Image (cartoon, rainbow, N blue to C red):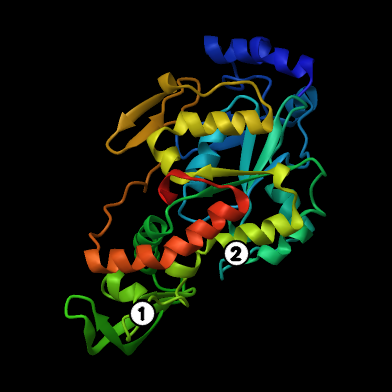
Amino acid sequence: MSQNTSNRSSSSREGHFSSGKNNTYGTFPEGCYVYSKGRLALSRSEVEESLQKLLNCEKRPPKAVILGVKKCGTETLTGLLDLHPYIVTSIYPVSNNGCISLENVAFERSIPLTTSDEIGLLDMVGMQYSPHKVSELLEFISNDTKFILILKDPIERAISDYKHVLVKMNLPKGKDITTSREEHVWGYHRNKEIGPEIVKYFKGYRVAKSFEKSVLNSLGQIDVSNKLIYLGFYYDYVQSIFYQISKERVLILDGQAFIEKPWSVLKQVESFLDVPSFFARKKFQKEGKFFCPIIKERPDSGCLKGKGRNKPRVNKLVLKSLKSFFRPLNELLRDSVGANLSWMQ
């Protein structure tokens, strides 16, 4: 970032942010959006066209892209970064099967409006299902665009995903298609196959009555065909990214550290994107297990709804099997790309 850009941290925008001035268009008259109470990065509306022209609001190619991974904190990360006075975020849609479909119209529609001072950031978590399309993505963005990955312990990711899928499967009929059939399942308490049960299938997920029965097949082995498991194969995904993008353009974040000290991880992103420092411990308030941003100038700040669902207790023997299964994959990721994250210890 140039010297002039760095100086903006104490210029007009920072002044508005600290003083909380308001007018017809909201707290930041130099921004392209007005924010209202609701979910982060989603509760906003564009300022009037006349003001957009005055502020030079345009759909510029995004300077940063979040590439996932699902249930590792991507949505929260996107929402928090949108609170930064120099970052505007947006979410690229995924298709019904959870994949990315890159199209000029869809991409253009997803890009947020930014002023010449701001950078746009696009959350494309669905790229995890179509890693081969990363090279195609490069045709839509500039050569200096940077990429962000946030990774959590794959077992914790699977448990969180299991709860998420259960909620999705209970949506009104017609919203998503769920199939079911009787299958023999593994009784993890008895350590042997037990009688048939109804098992549901949902967009690549195999979901039984419990998390344990969902991740084990009828032989008591880890079910690698289940999305709950194979979405935790981070090494394959990261390697496919580095095959198409230089490592210098990619930042890998620790999902566990993000839960414990979000401001610390956000500062890593600020440094990576070369934007003025904004996030600090004092801007967060702990509510239950999570830290929530409290930014008085942004009515959409606060805890995201639907987060912090109660997670099932997992049988210790199954947890041990999962840890043994993922350990070599985690070590491979750590040794190959130098991603020594806290949950890998």
Q: Secondary structure at mark 1?
A: loop
Q: Does residue 94 appear in this view?
A: no
| Residue at x 55% of width, y 47% of height | 339
Residue 274, percent across and down? 69, 28
Farthest residue toward the front?
335
Q: According to the image, label 1 marks what residue? A: 221
Task: Please report whichever mark, 1 or 2, sits nearer to the chain's N-terminal start.
Answer: 1
| Residue at x 45% of width, y 33% of height | 262
In the foreground, 290 or 51: 290
| Residue at x 51% of width, y 40% of height | 77
In the foreground, 8 or 16: 8
Q: Quadrant of residue 89?
A: top right
Q: CA distance from mark 1 to mark 2?
A: 21 Å
Position of residue 139 in the picture relative to residue 247 (left or right):
right
Q: Is residue 199 above or below residue 267?
A: below
In the foreground, 4 or 42: 4
Q: According to the image, label 2 marks what residue? A: 236
Residue 186, percent across and down? 27, 82
Q: Quadrant of residue 195?
A: bottom left
Residue type at mark 1? Gln
Position of residue 292 in the picture relative to residue 340 (left or right):
left
